[in-house]
Amino acid sequence: MPEFPPAIAQYFDCINNERWDAFPEVWAADAELVGVGGHHYRGRENVLGYYPPVLAPFPVHFDDAYTCYADGDVYTVEIEFRGETHEGTPVSFEAVDVFTLRDGKIGRLTTWYDVDAVRDAARRPGPRETRIRRVIERAASRSPFYQGRGLDPDAELSSLPTTTEADVLGDPAAFATTAGPAVARLTWLDGQGALPLTHGDAYDEVRMLRLALETAGAKRGEIVASLGIPGFEAAVAATGATLLSGGGSGTVEVSILAPAETGPLGVECAQGQLHLLADDHVLEVIDGRLVTTPLCRRGAPLLRYATSESGSLVDGQCACGSPLPRFARA
């Protein structure tokens, strides 16, 4: 890395090592950040809030600042970003940051990169086994509940005991693996407490809801009544359908199974069959109970969670044409 002024050197150290406690020190109180697309963030607190959602899709990330050009107090830095998504997909891209220093702190930062290419990279699914391993490792290293169980980060998922609703409701906070600015939303559990979702979780939730809506028949020209599920409006917009709020029926009937603990889990198709979102869950049926390990609940991982759904998996493909597996409720 080139030799930088202390504030810029500390900036990259904080970003690359997620030293968020020291991050405010590098910014002037009236700092300004101009992000991709001309979005402005004014004031230190607003600038600091920019970073968690931007980095959320990349739990592994490194800004390799390889070139720096100085012109007085203005420093132009060329960067190669290297990272990995939550699903284990490697991502790299070029970026340019222009820093303006005032009294030894960052007064203004303008950043450029190809946002469309980055978004496409973040959406690519990673290897399923990598995703499963990441969930187990996160639970073992950060979840007080699973640490209390003595969870081995190298354990095979099938060897682990189930997690029950009573476990979660008994102490929701024991399942949390994130806090502070990294939390995008808190999901309230029947007055017992809340489970946090990371920004990556919230992003994935919209993607999963979009798949559920499309399986139900939502598309451009159709009208979908709001279900009040977090992320639902954004998912409807992604399908091209029209959202109906405030009551009434749409042109497409949508019924989504989305327990608060697990997020979107299944959806009924036009044939009335319940399809499970198997790409983002490890699904089992144990003693007639649907059990899932969500792969998109990093804020509060659940391993082999026994849902309240009873029934069995259905063989064969549905007449609706969806490749998603079916579940017949008892």
Image (tube, helix red, strand yellow):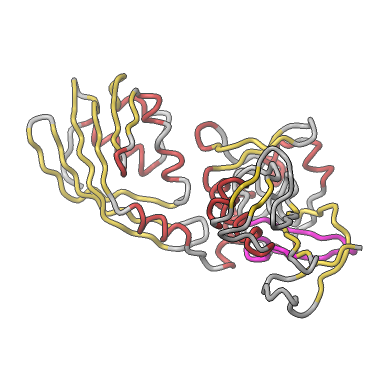
| Residue lying furthest bottom | 316
Which residue sits at x=40%, y=24%?
A: 45
Quadrant position of the C terminus in the picture: bottom right
Which residue sits at x=29%, y=39%?
A: 38
> Which range of residues does the magenta coloring cover?
275-295
Seen from the viewer's position, the closer of residues 70 and 2 is: 70
Q: Main secondary structure of the magenta part?
A: strand
Image quadrant in which you'd find residue 183: top right
Which residue sits at x=67%, y=61%?
A: 281
Q: Position of residue 185 (x, y in %)?
A: 60, 37
| Residue lying furthest right | 330
Q: Is residue 250 left or right of residue 178?
A: right
Image quadrant in which you'd find residue 80: bottom left
Seen from the viewer's position, the closer of residues 294 and 319 is: 319
Which residue sits at x=41%, y=44%?
A: 54
Seen from the viewer's position, the closer of residues 89 and 10 is: 89
- 78 shown above or below 282: above
Q: Position of residue 29 (x, y in %)?
A: 31, 19
Image quadrant in which you'd find residue 207: bottom right
Q: Position of residue 178 (x, y in %)?
A: 57, 39
Would you say residue 282 sits in the magenta stretch? yes
Q: Position of residue 252 (x, y in %)?
A: 70, 58
- 6 shown above or below 209: above
Q: Is residue 5 left or right of residue 270?
A: left
Q: Is residue 236 left or right of residue 14?
A: right
Would you say residue 98 sits in the magenta stretch? no
- 168 shown above or below 303: above
Q: How many marks?
A: 0
